[in-house]
Image (cartoon, rainbow, N blue to C red):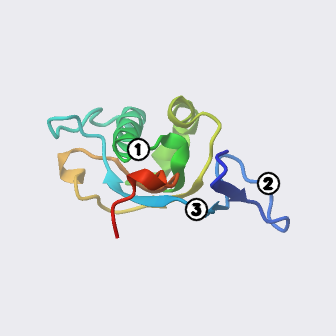
Amino acid sequence: MKDYISAVRPRTLPKPAGFSYAMEVKSGRVVFVSGQVAVDANGRIVGRGDLVAQFRQTCANLQAVVIAAGGDMTDFVKLTIYVLDVADYKKNLEPIGEVYRDYFGKYFPAMTLVGVRDLFDAANGALIEIEGMAALPPLPREVLPPS
C-alpha cells in the first residue's frame, strides 16, 4: 500500500474479505470520479445484457479517469457500485472477482454495493455504474501552481 494511504481495520469487526472498512488518506490530492458505466469511446454500451462484460468496461473507464488524473487503480480509496440486480451480481461474484483482480490486483479500497431501481443509462442497456474517490500523491513543490 502507498505511504499516503492506509487501510483502517477495527479489531471489533470481522476481517474484511474483498474490501476495506475504511481508508485513511494521510496526504496528497483527492480525485472524485463520477459514476462510470460500460460505454466505449463512442458512448455506446458495451456488453449489453452481460453484467461481467459491463463490469470489465466500467473498470476500464475508471482506470482511464484515474490515469488521466495522474494516478492508478491502487489510488482508489472508495468505490460505490450501483447495480440494477444484486442477485445477478452475487451470482456472478467469481467472474466479477477475476475482472476486479485484473484491474486492482489484491488491493481492496472501501467498497459498497447498492441495488437500485434505475440508472441514468439503464434505458441504453447499462446494468452497473461505479463511482469512486482516489487519493493521489502530493504534486512536487515545483509543479504546484502559484498561490
Q: Is residue 65 left or right of residue 42?
A: right
Q: Give the distance between the C-alpha atoms of the residues marked 1 and 2, in whole angstroms.
A: 31 Å
Name the quadrant of the N terminus. Answer: top right
Instruction: Give neighbour class at mark 2: few <14, some 14-19, many 20+ (Cα, 10 Å).
Output: few
Amino acid residing under circle 2: Lys
Check whether the beta carbons of the residues at disc 1 and disc 3 lie within 8 A of each other.
no
Q: Give the distance between the C-alpha atoms of the residues marked 1 and 3, in whole angstroms.
A: 15 Å
Residue at mark 3: 27
In x, y percent, where is residue 133? 46, 58
Q: Quadrant of residue 125?
A: top left
Viewer can see residue 86: yes
Amino acid residing under circle 1: Gly
Q: Residue at x 63, y 55 (%)?
A: 5
Amino acid residing under circle 3: Ser
Name the quadrant of the C terminus. Answer: bottom left
Check whether the beta carbons of the residues at disc 1 and disc 2 lie within 8 A of each other.
no
Viewer can see residue 80: no
Q: Give the distance between the C-alpha atoms of the residues marked 3 and 2, in whole angstroms.
A: 26 Å
In x, y percent, where is residue 94? 58, 33
Q: Residue at x 57, y 33 (%)?
A: 101
Front residue of 102 and 54: 102
Front residue of 34 and 97: 34
Q: Is residue 111 above or below residue 40?
A: below
Mark in front: 1 vs 2: 1
Q: Which mark is residue 15?
A: 2
Mark in front: 3 vs 2: 3
Q: Secondary structure at mark 3?
A: loop
Front residue of 20 and 86: 20
Label 3 vs 2, first from the N-terminus: 2
In x, y percent, where is residue 51? 39, 38
Residue at mark 1: 70
